[in-house]
Image (tube, rainbow, N blue to C red):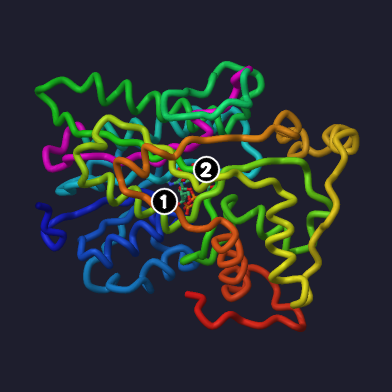
Amino acid sequence: MTDPSNTLVLVTGSSGYLATHCVQQLLWAGYRVRGTVRSLKNEKKVAPLRALEHADERLELVVADLEQAEPWPAAVKGCDYVLHTASPFPIIADEGIVELAVNGTLFVLRACAKEPSVKKVVLTSSCAAINEGHDDEDRVFTEADYTVEDSPKVPPYSRSKAAAERAAWEFQRSIPDSDNKFALTTINPTLITGPLLMDTQGTSITIVRRFLNNEMPGTPALNLGIVDVRDVAKAHILAMTNPRTDGERILVTATPSLWFKDIAKILAAEFRSQGYWLPSLQVPYPILVLYSFFDSEAKSILMRVGRKVRFDNSKAKELLGMQFKDPAKSIVEMAYSMIERGILPKRAGYKPPTDVK
Ligand code: NAP
């Protein structure tokens, strides 16, 4: 049985949207946590981490960048477990992020293979490493599926997640017995929603920000799997100490998937009466095609329009006992936390919820 107070967990990219929840849940569970950040001088990123409950007792922060190998041996030194959540996640990605994601993951894993204390790495992958680039897009996808990395239908971010995950498995299987052969699990989330514990505006919050900031005149016919950020963090931590998950990829998602128009309806039901405008019309496909000629974002989503995505989450339920939070509630809580943190404006008529953290 693991004694959390004697257990050190490294969380890479600890100032990220998901990682801050991992750090908070680890601290609540009594673990000692080391988080990596790209700069200790970036107050906007570091201050929310230092403000987490129990951070003053059990959280240390160190600097490490995925673009360099050098910092990682010191970052993993003495750690029992590593949650590798850091990955380049730009809104518009080019092919350069594939190499960065793969190399960065290998820098972390090579350091773990030379550090005898590391028992296990839990890697944050994505559904993007599972269901992209297939011809039979309408079936239900499981952990047995792998994104077709060389398909022209696969955008660079998805390719980066698929390639980094594949590189991780190949590396872990090739570790010689003379090195530290740590166990590996990947957690593969769909779109993550839910409240923020940080203040920066990364890609993860783009969809809800655009909806409530009047930046979406209509909804494209896009369909997404959705999972609450607290569930994703919980899955990482449960997998960390559960040997039944060694060598497993685990899809984490609530079901069923939602269309953008469903997300607009959920937000409208809560926020329209509070002074926020939300789109009620779907953007017709020919308009999106026209738009895609001069908008790289519209171009990047074109191939997904009209396609319903379906995932099987039974492995997460069976191996980790996961019960997924209601996506509608998760989306509303995300929006409230973005308003409360000043990422979205408080419109006249806004009524703060009583229970937002
Ligand atoms: P996020 O807030 O942007 O977090 C990404 C983290 O990676 C940040 O801490 C970022 O550091 C770090 N990072 C990026 N480039 C780096 C580099 N060169 N060196 C060191 N650190 C670097 O996004 P998130 O939503 O929490 O994503 C966390 C993980 O979940 C990622 O692996 C992402 O691919 C995966 N994922 C996310 C979603 C989603 O819907 N959000 C869905 C599936 C999978 P800075 O804070 O310094 O930028």
Q: Secondary structure at mark 2?
A: loop
195 shown above or below 81: below
Residue 130 lies in the magenta-colored region: yes
Please give the name of the residue rendered at 22% of the width and 72% of the height, measured from the top-left corner: 57
What segment is highlighted magenta in the picture?
Answer: 113-135
Quadrant location of residue 294?
A: top right
SS class, disc 1: helix
* Rendered residue at 51%/76% (across/down): 356
From the viewer's perspective, tell me whether residue 334 is left or right of residue 152. Answer: left
| Residue that appears at 37% across and 42% down | 316
Name the amino acid, label 1: Val
The residue drawn where x is 71% and y is 48% is: 260
Q: CA distance from mark 2 to mark 1?
A: 9 Å
Residue 269 lies, in percent from the top left, at: 72, 67
Is residue 38 at least partly visible in the picture?
A: no
The answer to whether mark 2 is within 8 Å of ligand 1 is: yes
Magenta segment, prevailing SS (helix, strand or loop): loop
In the rendered image, the vertical position of residue 101 relative to residue 18, given as above or below: above
The reply to whether the residue tagged 1 has its Cβ within 8 angstroms of ligand 1 is yes
Residue 149 in view (yes/no): yes
Q: Which mark is residue 232?
A: 1
Q: Position of residue 235 (x, y in %)?
A: 35, 49
Residue 190 - label: 2
Of the pair 329 and 68, the residue shown nearer to us: 329
Crowding at dot 2, Cα within 10 Å, few <14 / some 14-19 / many 20+, comes out as many
